[in-house]
Image (spheres, rainbow, N blue to C red):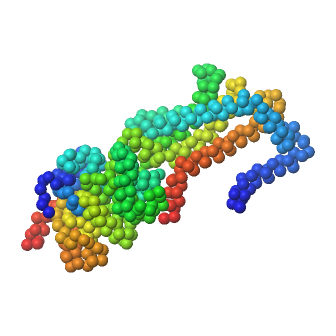
Amino acid sequence: MTANKSDVRLSVQQLRKVYGVGSRNEVEAVRSLTFDLHAGEFACLVGPSGSGKTTLLKCIAGLLEPTSGEVVLDGRRVAGPAEGMAVVFQEYSRSLFPWLSVEDNVELPLKTSGVPKAERKERVSEALEAVSLSHATKSYPWQLSGGMQQRVAIARAVASNPSVLLMDEPFAAVDAQTRGELEDLVRDVWKRLNMTILFVTHDIDESVYLAERVLVLSSSPTIIQADLHIDLPDVRSQADTRSLHRFGELRHQVYEEVQFAKINPGGERTAAREELRS
Amino acid sequence: MIVLKRIGMWFGLPAILIAIWWATTAQGVNFFVPKPDKMASTFAKVWYSEKFFTDVLPSIGRLSISLLISLVLGVVLGIAIGLSRNLRWLLEPLLEFVRAVPSTILIPVLLLLIGINDTMKVAVIVLGCLWPILLNTVEGVRSLDEVLKNTARVYGLRGFDRIRYLVLPGASPLIMAGIRHSLAVGLILLVVSEMFASTDGIGYSIINFQNRVAIPEMWSGIVLLGIIGVLLSVAFQAIQKRVLGWYYGLKEASNDG
């Protein structure tokens, strides 16, 4: 993949977030974060718990204002929730509107942004088909299982046709089997619709299985500790990919980074590690 | 079968009570307690007449208009206050004070200010019915789910769209609870406002019958109020079932899971 400047979708530049600036309980959650996400890329952000993953994602989504630094989406600086950014939250049951049916949930963002009705209907049914929920359009979210609810949330995000899709530990609250299905579904949707995805997770296996690129975060105050390319075959399956020798190697590599991240707040000991390695 | 059972449950206890009433008044000793049959015929005679138009309809009209005003004012102000922290800080102490003053005690004041007319009665009822709706709306808006609010922000729900698709439905369970409370308060205040200074209405009629020692007629007015209360409650529950269908489903689903 050639990474030239023109196909950068999302650019995060020296992002810093400090809570309670000026007060006695000042907490530096994110120290300095810089990375670019290119069109069509599927990247995972992985880090130990308490590594400021959610803070970071909220800053990128425009839900939190960074203390300094900037987030640029399609060449425009993000200030507040930006058009072209869709988010799938971990808490699927609280993220869907319980008073709207499945199709109304998916349609709502299109409706309020003024997409004509005929086009709306088409995009909604396409998105629901992409997540294999065409049979449940009239149901309410709470009538569905957790995995299906998260699929509705994914369909809603996909239907809005985002430049970048952000996913905040979307499968942390579903059971293992459903999780495998949803992982394949996300990869399928990503490939089929040529999307750009930034996926936050604490699960190392998940990050290696899903992404083409894994960014390992240090513990808080957060920096990017490692940026790894995942050179697994493009077509992946739960059974085969996970038993590849290369999968094990990459998993091991990410695991080591994450272990190191736990004792590496703010990247202060990165230099020490380089010595350790050589 | 289920329908029959429900009808039986509905009317069973009232039927038993009427039977007891019948049995205990059969001798007809107490002047102030009429017999059920006399009661029924008086009820028909009194209210199935032009009194329906001159007294019942004006009362129902006052109640309806007052409830409508309370609903609109309560929800609009409640959403504004619920959404704005500054407005809450500014108004909350004042609201608590005004709410604590029973609106019936304002009747003499309103009589002086507004006079003996429908506006005065509507004002009394609104001053009582507004608070349950207003305060519940504020609470409903404040307790909107954080994740849902973030979702709405991410997908660009702003201004009127945000209120229509997020705030109003999200607050609707508490708003409905407020309305239910207001219905009960409204009926009480209707009667009280008509008892004080009025020339028509159900409350006025009851007091008038009492003054004329028309005991069965007086009782028939009380029964009429009870029936209106039941009808209001039935209508409210039907509306609530429609508006909050999702809410009961959601609650049931989360109890199961």
Residue ID at (28%, 56%): A165
Residue ID at (66%, 36%): B188
In the figure, is residue A163 to the left or right of B140? Answer: left
Residue ID at (51%, 64%): B256
- Work out whether A60 lies above or below B44: below
Residue ID at (55%, 43%): B178
The number of numbered discs placed on residues in the rendered structure image is 0
Considering depth in this image, is B24 or A162 the residue closer to the camera? A162
Tell me where residue A92 appears, x and y as whole percent: 39, 59
- Work out whether B186 lies above or below B20: above
Quadrant where the image shows the N terminus of chain A: bottom left
Tell me where residue B204 appears, x and y as whole percent: 72, 29
Considering depth in this image, is B22 or B252 the residue closer to the camera? B252
In the figure, is residue A126 to the left or right of B12? Answer: left
- Residue B96 in view: no
In the figure, is residue B58 to the left or right of A55? Answer: right
Tell me where residue B254 appears, x and y as whole percent: 49, 61
Tell me where residue A63 appears, x and y as whole percent: 30, 49
Name which quarter of the figure residue A205 lies in: bottom left
Farthest residue to the right: give it. B27
Considering depth in this image, is B238 or B66 the residue closer to the camera? B238
- Residue A277 in view: yes
Quadrant where the image shows the C terminus of chain A: bottom left
